[in-house]
Image (tube, rainbow, N blue to C red):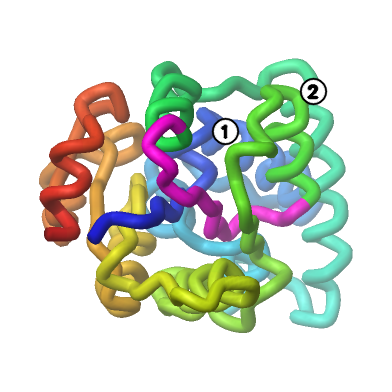
Amino acid sequence: MFRAVLFDFDGVITDSEILHLRAFNSVLSSHGLEITKKDYYTAYLGLTDLDCFKTLIAEGRLNLDVSGIDDLISQKSVIFEELVETEGSIIEGVRDFLAMLKHNSIIMAICSGALMAEIEVILGQARLRSFFEVVVSAEQVRRGKPDPEGFLLTLQKLNRQRQDAIEANECIVIEDSHWGLEAANEAGIHTVGVTNSYDAEQLTMAEKIVSHLGELNIENLRQLCS
């Protein structure tokens, strides 16, 4: 049975990955560091802000004690929200896809490595918040993707007020990166990869790969869970 869709956010709902990169580089510039677009998409895109800064420190690229990471995260969040105010956008086809799921009584949630404030400002501007019963953000988990903690927490939150619990195999995760797909697979959830950020060759762990959400209909989603 097909009952729920769990969405990644950046690169699936909103076209904001490049804004994240610009916000990171704005903060990192005072430390003499710039992440190239190629490096960001190869090594850092699927990480939470915390894990990204930790990784840069571990790699020796960022000369900073880990105790200073919280301040960098706060600075980056402010810059990102400013960029979103003027340049944020919802990916084409998302609104129609959400409406199709709602029409078919499919439950929707977000599980993202982004901060809650970043997610809420974009959903609020686009008037999409009401579609999602649960939003799980970076602050709510100890381990980001590819760890399955976020998806398992999302299911737990969805089931808090339900007597008939939603099982992992009754859900589909929609992701744009291998980090997220690995996490979903580990959680036992069906997967769709969308090629908004990476080529299909880099999303081969997904059960189904599409170039945009308009390629999906309620019948082929149900087939994934059958």
Can residue 59 be seen here? The reply is no
Magenta residues? 103-116
Residue placed at 21% from the left, 44% from the top?
221
Q: Percent position (x, y) of residue 81?
A: 80, 36
Residue type, mark 1 in image: Ser
In the depicted view, which residue is nearer to us: 33 or 87?
87
Q: CA distance from mark 1 to mark 2?
A: 12 Å
Q: Which residue in the rendered view is the most extreme toward the front? A: 163
Q: Percent position (x, y) of residue 99?
A: 47, 26
Q: Percent position (x, y) of residue 167?
A: 35, 74
Q: Percent position (x, y) of residue 57?
A: 62, 74
Residue placed at 16% from the left, 37% from the top?
219
Q: Within 10 Å of the Cα at label 1, are there few (<14), some (14-19), or many (20+) other Cα atoms? A: many
Q: Is residue 134 above or below residue 120?
A: below
Left or right: residue 162 versus residue 104 is right
Q: Is residue 197 above or below residue 54?
A: above
Q: Is residue 118 above or below residue 213?
A: below
Q: Which mark is residue 86?
A: none
Q: Quadrant of residue 116?
A: bottom right
**Do the residues bearing badges 1 and 2 touch, measured as CB atoms within 8 Å?**
no
In the image, residue 106 lies in the stretch drawn in magenta:
yes
Q: Secondary structure at mark 2?
A: helix
Q: Secondary structure at mark 1?
A: loop
Which residue is disc 2 drawn over?
85
Residue placed at 70% from the left, 25% from the top?
127
Which residue is disc 1 drawn over?
16
